[in-house]
Amino acid sequence: MEGLSIKVHHIVNVTTTKLAEIKEETSKDDELQLLTQMVIQGWPEKRHQVQPLIREYWAIHDDISVENGILMAGSRIIIPKSMQKEILDKIHQGHLGMEKCKLRVKSAVYWVGMYKDIEKTVSTCHICQKYRNSQQKEEMISSDILRRPWQTIGVDLFTEGQEWYLIMVCYYSKFPFVRKVKDLRAKTITTVARGLLAEQGIPEQIICDNRTQFTSQEFKKLADEYGFNITTSSPHYPKGHGFIERQVQTVKRTPVKCRETKEDPHLALLSLRATPLRADMKFPAEFVSEQYKLCFKVNSITTLCLMIYRCRCAESSAVRVTWKSK
């Protein structure tokens, strides 16, 4: 059962209790019980020999299995009819648009007509339709430029209502980190940024605009101490800050949409982080574990080398001072 929870956990909070509920509802579902019997007994040679109630499963019949009372279509859990509305609501959470909703379910859950249900839900949702034109496709940056999570991050400040926020987004994973700031002083922004970097690891490069908070001595000192480069947006780097601005707009729209629907914006952000970037890619949250493994390993070595270099520079300076004093 533990292995199954991984499959759908990024859509619905799949606890042992939830898996038990899926198992229980599967046992009450006439269609899925007939399907279970067919899987156990073996499929006939021809589609027309399958009972009409489960004939729609013929196209994927080779992938269907039974795991501890739960039906699987490959790596996806087949959801009983009584729970499909609940799962559909979770898929739709955050109002991320048609493409993102379909990406969320691609490797997690399955039922006959699922994609049509998603299309109907999104096309009849006034919030999704209202923000449809603002759903931007993710710009994929060449892997020759980005080799790992948290190698390059973008930072910016944005306001929502009366509050100001600092946002950090990994260019590789598109995972957004958002922190509320009490004021816009350079010292405050640097302190919040320092805390995020201490939690997530040190990047090679931070890309930002020319706000005074990011060009301040405090922020430059942070870069020197932590050993990362600061790249500010300029005519020579047109795409540099465009990425973070798009991420800001995506994050800013989240609470706006949630206010209209009276949904939890934190869960909507969770949905954003748990949605694959493309059909052939992981979702942002999956990169986080890689980020911890790689970034802390790389940066622990980088920090050590930086410390050795600084010590040698200090020793070299001391030798020069001693030599001159003689």
Image (spheres, helix red, strand yellow):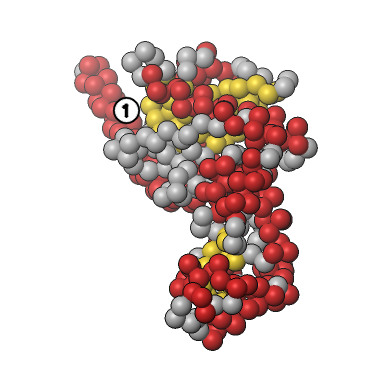
Give residue 241's position: percent from left, percent from top.
45, 22
Judge whether 23 appears above or below 130 on screen.
below
Name the residue that disc number 1 marks: 314
Secondary structure of the residue carrying tag 1 is: helix
Q: Quadrant of residue 195?
A: top right
Q: Are there few (<14), some (14-19), or many (20+) residues within 10 Å of tag 1? A: few
Question: Is 13 situated left or right of 225 in this image?
Answer: right
Would you identify the image quadrant in which residue 325 lies? top left
**Number of marks present in the image shown:** 1
Question: Residue 225 is drawn in which quadrant?
Answer: top left
Residue 229 seen in the current view: yes
The percent position of residue 77, horizontal first and vertical second, equals 58, 65
Name the residue at 51% across, 27% down: 246
Q: Is residue 24 left or right of residue 1?
A: right
Q: Where does residue 197 sit, x and y in percent of width and height?
A: 51, 36
Q: Quadrant of the C terminus?
A: top left
In this view, the residue farthest toward the right is 262
Can I make out residue 189 in this image? no
6, 202: nearer the viewer: 6
Observer-nearest residue: 125 or 245?
A: 125
Against 152, is 215 above or below? above
Please state, as top left, top right, bottom left or bottom right, where the N terminus lies in the image: bottom right
| Placement of 8 over or under 235, stated as above or below | below
**In the image, is 78 to the left or to the right of 234?**
right
Say above or below: 32 vs 313.
below
Q: Report the residue at 56% width, 71% height from top.
A: 55
Q: Residue at x 64, y 40 (%)?
A: 123
- Pick the residue in front: 203 or 49: 49
Q: Is residue 189 left or right of residue 82?
A: left
Amino acid marked by disc 1? Ala
Q: Which residue: 54% across, 17% down?
A: 213
Pick whichever, 218 or 84, lies toward us. Answer: 84
